[in-house]
Image (tube, rainbow, N blue to C red):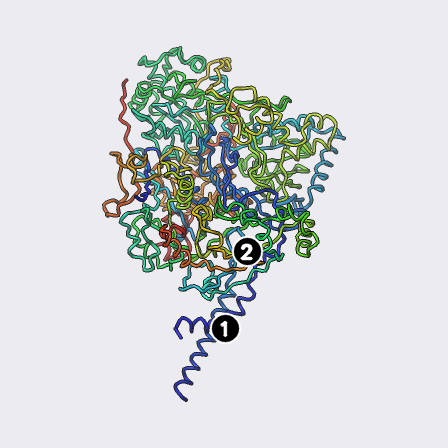
Amino acid sequence: MAHQWGMVIDLDRCTGCAACVVACHAENNISTVGEDQAARGRAKHWIRVERYYEGEFPDVRVKFMPVLCQQCDAAPCEPVCPTFASYHTIEGLNGQVYNRCIGTRYCANACPYNVRFFNFYNPEWDKPLNLQLNPDVSVRSVGIMEKCTFCVQRIKASEIQAEAEKRAVKDGEIQPACVQSCSPHAMVFGDLSDPQSEVSRLARSSRGTKLLGELGTQPKVTYLQRESWHGAENA
Amino acid sequence: MSRSNLGLKRCLRVTVFLGMIILVLSLLDRTSPAQDTAPPPQTMTQSSPIFTPAHRTVMDAVREFFGSRQKPVQPIAYTHKVHLANGMQCTDCHVGVDRGPDARIPSVNFCMTCHQVIATDKPEIKKLAAYRARGEDIPWQRVYGFLPSAHVKFNHAPHIRAGVDCAQCHGDMTKQTVAVRMVDHTMGFCVQCHREKNVSVDCVACHY
Amino acid sequence: MERRDFLKISAATGAVAALEGCGNPDHQLIRFVPEEDMLPGLATWKPSICTLCPAGCGMLVRVMQGEAEVVRNGQLGILKMGLPKKLEGNPAHPISHGRLCPRGQAGLQVTYHPDRIKTPLARSGPRGSGQFQEITWDEAMKQLLSHLTALQTSNEQGKIGFLTSPLRGQRKTIVHGFAAALKAAPPIEFAFLASRTIQEANAWSFGSDALPTVDLSHSNYLISFGADFLGTWNSPVAQSVGYGHMRNGRTGQPGKFVQVESRISQTGASADEWIPSQPGMDGVFALSLAHVILSEKLGTAGAAGHAGALIAGWSEGLPDYAPAAVEKQIGVPAATISRIAREAAANAPAVALIGDGPAAHTNGFFNALAVNALNAVLGSVGKPGGIVFSPVWTSQSGKPGAAEGKKDGESSVRTLAEQIHATPDSVKVLLVDGANPVFATPMAWRVREAFEKVPFIASFGSFIDETTVLADLILPDHSPLESWLDDSPESGSTKTVASLAPPAMQPLHNTRSMPDVLLDLAHQLGGPVAAALPWKTYDDALKIAFSSLQKQKGSVSATDADDFWTKVKDQGGWWSAEDKSVSLAAGKIPAAAVKNTAPQFDGSPDQFPFHFLPFASQLCYDGSLAHLPWMQESPDPLSTVMWGTWVEMNPRTAEKLAIKQGDTIEVASQHGSLRAPALIAPGIAPDVIAMPIGQGHTNFTRYASGRGANPISILAPMVESGTGSLAWAATRVKISHISEGKIVMFGASLTDASPELKHR
């Protein structure tokens, strides 16, 4: 059976530090757009840290939630694409085939998570910043939609390596850039089709919820909700 | 005026008009390639079946659409035929092809390990020695390779491990002197083989 | 003829001409012979050390072959070389545990920055104009040597100043050794977020002049007084790893985390309980907790040892700190204080931290001592789940370092500036490496004006910043990824850590490693200076220094010296086999027990009604990373602001002053004013105005210059009364509404660009 890649994000551990955001930029050749374009909502962050304030001073609580493409099983972005650039891969990812994309942006419109980003201009790197570009990842050009791929280049590399060594991909062997950077280990990535994998085990947690799951998108990212502390005042 | 005449005139007008558009677009074609790898080889011999704007510049798209290419001009008339006839293997020089995505194109130092003593009087070898003497590497031009706009990530190693012969994708190099592109690496070419061998034809197998 | 073919033919006529001219100019550059043998497309991993903050995380650098335009022997060409593509934490490293923070991830952009200084420069315009001309290394060295030897001959070596960012390891040995042998003034190590007050308090309480290592993974209860320990304070990656474990990484009860501060910080946002308290009252809060613990017999006064005995009234059970008596002062209900104290005592191991703002009041030293005493009575000092002090490796390359133990606070620069203003002749040559005090000190200190009086300034900087722009001569250092690096972090691990890294790449530009330049200078100066620095290169010095570790039990076992050196280089350093913490010596014994002193603030409450709280930016840190485009464009996690700064205020405050989100407001202290957009957020006390440090550079590359405002500039020159450090949280300000403005936020920008954008 094909792998079904999924992720669990433990909001009890997430500190909202944004290491995942920068790691994603570095890994995936995501260009910066500058202040003016950013002001127009054109900054590209395949993963972002959402922050929610609750309550009023002095009883304020904050919640962080890293949001990336949820790699939905019933993805609203896929059926709307007239050129089949957004499609469902065998391993359950919401693929984005850049060559096919003609930039209708229907997918971004359909996506309830706001995780698809359009290239309004050709990406530019002031030389020699371009030397940092990861040769394992395409540089997307103007007119193309882009989004989180679960670091498919890392998935491929691990699969090819495992095949060369005539073994299966080990649980935990594949770490997308965001997962690898996460200091408090809030993110876990793995194969949901393997019930023994850590990600499957955690996804079954009673704390597990899906982001906007009521829309029926069947996301493959599970968020583990925060637990309130229930210790005692007296030993 | 006859109907056909009218048609011809309109046809000419459209021709001139389109030509001018292309010229203007080419002037706007200023974006430098963003990748740090060598500039993309302009070696598409077949035109693209569909026009897609998924290119860094409009001119890139136009070039691919028309199958325009620059023929690589090699700085040294290296002959594959002679080397292979002398019993050398592809992987002797193109190291790494069985380990990773790319095969190495040898540097001047690598060539000179043999040509320090072999055929030193030949004019092409003298060119080689001159590069070394100047402390320069040989500016080999790539013959194969995908345009960045193809968004293709090809990895040699699994193909070699699967027993795909070099000649299957690169032609019979024992007959070639300076390498020319003998096989068109179109998507159809890749997919046909993938289908025959029953391996993945999922888009993200190659496009990411 | 099909339509498509027709179109092709018609367009082709016009296209041909255009296509012919499409050669790529890159082809015309010559290609240098590659110096390393790499396979294309395959990644190798090289160890390195993150130098962007004092935590000292070990990294692995993903290096792949690429083609870079470089200048070699004065000629531009293309070189196939190993290029760092990605930075990850080194999983074997005891501090980073394979992880990195967002700033560490962006270290790549330091190396590849387009505005790096690429070759030695000599000033060609008026000082500060930013006009420089390129010179050769030979000329640069000659110029610097002539200035140094001139002072040598006139016997004025004491007028040579050396100003650096905080130094450790062999880099410190070389810098201090150079200065000592030259008989120059002792080097001054400057950083805005230096934590001197806390270090000194730890020396008093525990006999350890260092920041603590926090063993969060075993803690059951954590009270943090303002410490941004998950963001920027101390060793954030190591602390975040421990925090994750404390929250949900072990069986049983997750630990509780309480944060005390007047504005929700990056760290406070994760707290189970966030308690706003009055600025500067953290020491009283801590002692009130201790009072509850002592009075309810949850702990004994004697158990706190020296750390407790330092505090006036400790042995009597801190009678002045009963919650009911101090709740008004602290601004926290007595019931809450009692509850927190009981919870902490019931959920051992419990630990308290202090950092950032609370230590940057005029009574910061007292606050820190009070928290130390609380830790001591909680029994968390030197214990699992508490704070421990790491054994720091201090071996030198067979030579005693001039001042290995010496640590400077930010006030050292104030002293230097005052000295220059008083006696302009007292510093004739100033060498600057890595520090940018012109940006990171209050205008009231007049550092820029002082430096302008120094006849000759040489900088080893990689970028033109506010300090380097004043230099007469710039001898650019390699970027960290291009350099040999070593480090011996003072906290973050219970092991002794000696990190080491060879260069991860060849230099891109015509730069030289600063320690190598100093060694070269020493050799050329000859005499005692050359004798004091006998190593040919920095890596020679490192090899000799590290050889002393071979016999100790640690992460590397080797057959001989060369084998040991190779293995240490491959592993990214050496660390001890056992977890060990420094055994606590009795700290300093003061003449009298330390009493509470009320925090002083600059500016009267009527005229300047708001406390001004600058805080370290999660992305731009202390401003030294504002030049990286990734740091500018990544949204700040709390405010989501990109490419700029903001002034944070409570909604009630904003309503009272009729300020709307994004409005430009003016913040004025008695010492200056600045303008920035307002950000209205609930997590801040109504009488506090907060502002991130980092932006407001006047001269720091194309990405940071002229962007936002610098809160440090308007700070009052208040000092911490015990240590003399800058009390950067002790300024009061007033604010006024100026106009509608703009603020760039991820997903919700307010721009002044056009009306239709405003209503998007």
Please indicate whether residue C733 sits to the left or right of residue C182 in the image. Answer: left
Looking at the rendered structure, the secondary structure element under dot 1 is helix
Q: Nearer the viewer, residue C616 or A190?
A: A190
What residue is rendered at 54% in x and 53% in y? Answer: B38
Asked which secondary structure carries label 2, the reply is helix
Q: Residue furthest bottom?
A: B1
Could you tell me residue C733's position as x and y percent? 44, 37
Using the rendered image, report if marks 2 and 1 lie on a common chain.
no
Residue C737's label in the rendered image is none
Chain designation of label 2: B
The N terminus of chain B lies in which quarter of the figure? bottom left
Task: Give x and y (percent) for residue B48.
Answer: 43, 63
Whether residue C16 is visible, yes or no, is yes
Quadrant assignment, res A85? bottom left
Disc sitting over residue B174 in the figure: 2
Circle 2 packing at 10 Å, graded few (<14), some (14-19), many (20+), is some
Quarter occupied by residue C346: top left
Could you give the CA–CA distance between mark 2 and mark 1, rounded to whole angstroms?
38 Å
**Which residue is at a point 46% across and 17% down the rendered structure image?**
C594
Position of A71 with respect to C381 (left or right) is left
The nearer-to-camera label among 2 and 1 is: 2
Picture coordinates of residue A166, whole percent (x, y): 40, 39
For mark 1, does the 10 Å Cα neighbourhood hold few (<14), some (14 to 19), or many (20 or more) residues? some
Amino acid type, label 1:
Thr
In the rendered image, the vertical position of residue C174 relative to residue B35, given as above or below: above
Q: Position of residue C72 (x, y in %)?
A: 65, 47
Q: Pointer 2 and pointer 1: residues touching (CB < 8 Å)?
A: no
- Read off the residue under disc 1: C13
Instruction: Residue type at mark 2: give it.
Output: Thr
Q: Is residue C497 above or below residue B199?
A: above
Q: Chain of mark 1?
A: C
